[in-house]
Image (spheres, rainbow, N blue to C red):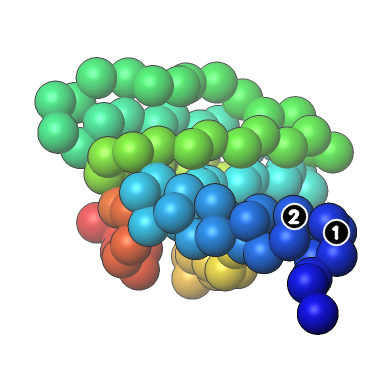
């Protein structure tokens, strides 16, 4: 018995998602309160994003290399990295390090 087209498409989507997950770090930030954000490349320090995310808004970044994310109001956001909720354990501004295939670290 052959799998249906939907089952085949689902399996292909899962395989593509696994490849993307291995090659990229996907960062999703949803602002509950306004939050200043700066995203920089860990390799050369170049700025990838800097701005204020208004309450009720969200942004997603997909990066192939390690990045640093500085947050001005970490208590006012919901942060998800590679599909896993991250909880910055501070209300003070913080800088977090993210790399493809690794867990985030505070710096």
Q: What separation in Å lies between label 2 and label 1 (alpha carbons)?
A: 5 Å
Front-lying residue, 25 or 98: 25
Percent from the top left, x then y, of residue 54?
75, 29
Q: Residues within 10 Å of mark 2 (few under 14, many from 20)?
A: few
The residue that appears at 79% across and 70% down in the rendered structure is 3
| Callout 1: SS | helix
Q: Determine contact: label 2, label 1, CB under 8 Å.
A: yes
- Res 78 → quadrant: bottom right
Residue 6 image label: 1
Q: Which secondary structure, mark 2?
A: helix
Q: Where residue 27 sits: x, y (%)?
A: 53, 47
Image side of residue 10 versus residue 56, left or right = left
- Identify whether 37 is placed above or below 32: above
Residue 66 spot, x, y in % from top left: 26, 44
* Residue 80 appears left or right of 1: left
Residue 61 visible in the picture: yes
Residue furthest to the front:
1
Task: Give the farthest residue toward the bottom.
Answer: 1
Q: Quadrant of residue 2?
A: bottom right
Q: For the residue carrying disc 1, how many other residues have a C-alpha within 10 Å: few (<14), some (14-19), or many (20+)?
A: few
Camera-nearest residue between 20 and 97: 20
Locate the N terminus by quadrant.
bottom right
Q: Position of residue 95 (x, y in %)?
A: 34, 48
Could you tell me which residue is drawn at 63 percent across and 56 percent down? 12
Front-lying residue, 65 or 2: 2
Residue 95 in sight from this viewpoint: no
Residue 9 shows which numbered tag? 2
User: The C terminus lies in which quarter of the figure?
Assistant: bottom left
Along the line of sight, the residue nearer the viewer: 96 or 83 = 83
Q: Residue at x 72, y 43 (%)?
A: 31
């Amino acid at each position: 018995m052959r799998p249906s087209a939907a089952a085949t498409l689902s399996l292909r989507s899962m395989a593509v998602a696994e490849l993307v997950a291995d090659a990229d770090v996907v960062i999703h930030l949803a602002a509950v309160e306004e939050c200043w954000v700066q995203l920089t490349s860990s390799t050369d320090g170049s700025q990838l994003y800097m701005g204020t995310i208004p309450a009720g808004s969200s942004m997603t970044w997909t990066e192939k290399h390690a990045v640093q994310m500085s947050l001005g109001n970490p208590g006012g956001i919901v942060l998800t990295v590679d599909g896993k909720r991250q909880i910055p354990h501070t209300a003070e501004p913080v800088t977090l390090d993210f790399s493809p295939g690794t867990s985030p670290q505070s710096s």
